[in-house]
Amino acid sequence: MQRYRISGEICTFAGKIRKIMGIKKLLMIVGIGSAAMACSDDEVPIANPEDFEPLTISFILYGDGEDLLNPASTGNVLQDSLYIVYNGDRFVCDLSAADTTFENDGSGKPEIRYVYNVEGQFYRVFFGSFNPAGEYKGERLVLHWGEGRTNEYSFSAFVVWNGDEAVPHYQFSTIPFDGVMQASATVSEIIEK
């Protein structure tokens, strides 16, 4: 029987064949395992933004019993600069004239808007909208509303998968609440004309 020297080892031709067959079996098992994992049910599907209502945050400012966003109120803050800092960006609210609706264009970029509700006769500042498909978790924003006054907020809008069903989750909280500002987060709140 002929012997070969391979990588410093002496082995028989039959031994070499057994090693090659063992490696082929190993590669075949790894290949089948990889294919099975690729077809696994553990793969998380991608959420479709059109399937969810976005989260919109609205702010109502009151002080001494007055609506501080109402131009008719003597103590209004409309002459002050009202803006939100979110993810390092500054979103300045145009307080020169109130819109009657707030509808985000769905681009995924947040917007800030000063809005008047004709039926309820109240003013709000809206910020959003945040679609849960965008996976917003533990996000923070700071509202600056003149004379150095600020309020910080935290929100989340994300999707949890329950089998094949996507379940949206929304959270909103004030950090801290100073007793003057009222804020709420609503899912797709649009002020009607």
Image (tube, rainbow, N blue to C red):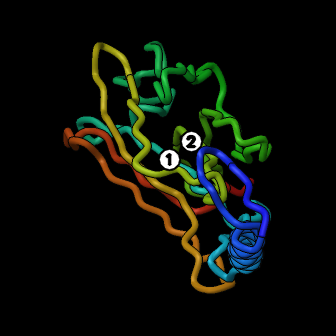
Disc 2: which residue: 126
Tag 1 residue: 58
Q: Quadrant of residue 59?
A: top left
Task: State the image coordinates of residue 108 (x, y, percent, origin top left).
Answer: 71, 42
Which one is in front, 186 or 33?
Answer: 33
User: Which residue shows up at 78% across the image and 63% down it?
Assistant: 2
Residue 86, label in figure: none
The quadrant where residue 116 appears: top right
**Most distant residue in the front direction:** 1
Which of the marked residues, 2 or 1, is nearer the chain's N terminus? 1
Residue at 34% from the left image edge and 47% from the top image edge: 182
What amino acid does circle 1 point to?
A: Ser
Q: Residue at x 69, y 45 (%)?
A: 102
Circle 2 crowding by C-alpha within 10 Å: few under 14, some 14–19, many from 20: many
**Near-viewer residue (51 or 189):** 51
As helix, strand or loop, the secondary structure at mark 2 comes to strand
Residue 157 is situated, as x and y percent measured from the top left of the image, at: 53, 58
